[in-house]
Image (cartoon, rainbow, N blue to C red):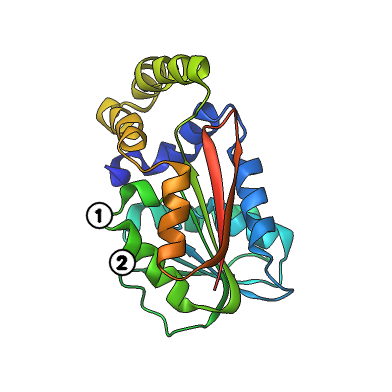
Amino acid sequence: MFTRIAVRYDSMNRLMSLGRDFSWRRRAIQLAALPPGGRLLDVAVGTGAMALVALERDPSARVAGLDFNDAMMRVGQLQEHEFSQRARGAIGWTGGDGLCLPYPEGIFDAVVSAFMMRNVTDVATALAEQRRVVRRGGRVVCLELTHPTLPLWREVYRLIFSKLMPLLTGLLSGQPGAYRYLPASVQNFVRADELRAMMEAVGLRGVGYQTMMLGTVAIHVGVK
């Protein structure tokens, strides 16, 4: 599915987020508290949007990006080149599994993921792996869609996100199945407070989260 939508993935994200997705990524990178020249791992790097935000914030950052989808990463490598000649080669693109990260323990200053957790078969294992590869005192940051809690808005959001948006994005992308999957994945995902509990259960400390976009997006942060 992600191979089929790779070329249109970022433009569809702009549309569905009303142009706000980059501001969410910037906030996630800010919360990662990466030191100057620090080592960052972006799990499920996809087209590299989060990794490029990190390099925009600190061009000296050493960014590794891991994904199991080659098509998404190929799009990202093209975008990395367009981003800036200085950034070319700054992202270490690696094919791999988010449930079994191919890195030694404690080598990153922070680990981030964006819109990944709804797509893994074992959220606890994914979180445990991210905790393993971050250094003591480093942060694990998860940007993800979540369930709004305000009753009236929750129903309006469900109508827009589950009915109208998949129809529009399916028509524009030519991949209606992929954009029917998106609302279903959110509906089946854990609530924000449940994700916080899962992060605590794998040993992350001081876990908290903040919501945005009327409670439809959450950024969770935990410390090793």
Residue at image location 37% in from the left, 28% down from the top: 173
Q: Nearer the viewer, residue 63 or 199?
A: 199
Q: Does 115 appear above or below 201?
A: above
Give the CA separation, mark 2 to mark 1.
Answer: 9 Å
Quickly name the residue at label 2.
99
Residue at image location 40% in from the left, 68% down from the top: 202
Residue at image location 45% in from the left, 60% down from the top: 199
How many numbered marks are there? 2
Residue 198 occupies quadrant? bottom left
Label 1: which secondary element: loop
In the rendered image, residue 107, in percent from the top left (x then y), is placed at 52, 83
Which amino acid type is marked by label 2? Leu
Q: Are marks 2 and 1 in contact (CB under 8 Å)?
A: yes
Quadrant into which the N terminus falls:
top left
Label 2: which secondary element: loop
Left or right: 197, with 68 as reference point = right
Q: Nearer the viewer, residue 11 or 167?
A: 167
Quadrant into which the C terminus falls:
bottom right
Q: Nearer the viewer, residue 66 or 148?
A: 148
Label 1: how many residues lie within 10 Å, few (<14), some (14-19) or many (20+)?
few
Label 2: how many residues lie within 10 Å, few (<14), some (14-19) or many (20+)?
some
Quickly name the residue at label 1.
121
Which amino acid type is marked by label 1? Thr
Q: Does 86 appear above or below 30?
A: below
In the rendered image, residue 204, in percent from the top left (x then y), is placed at 50, 68
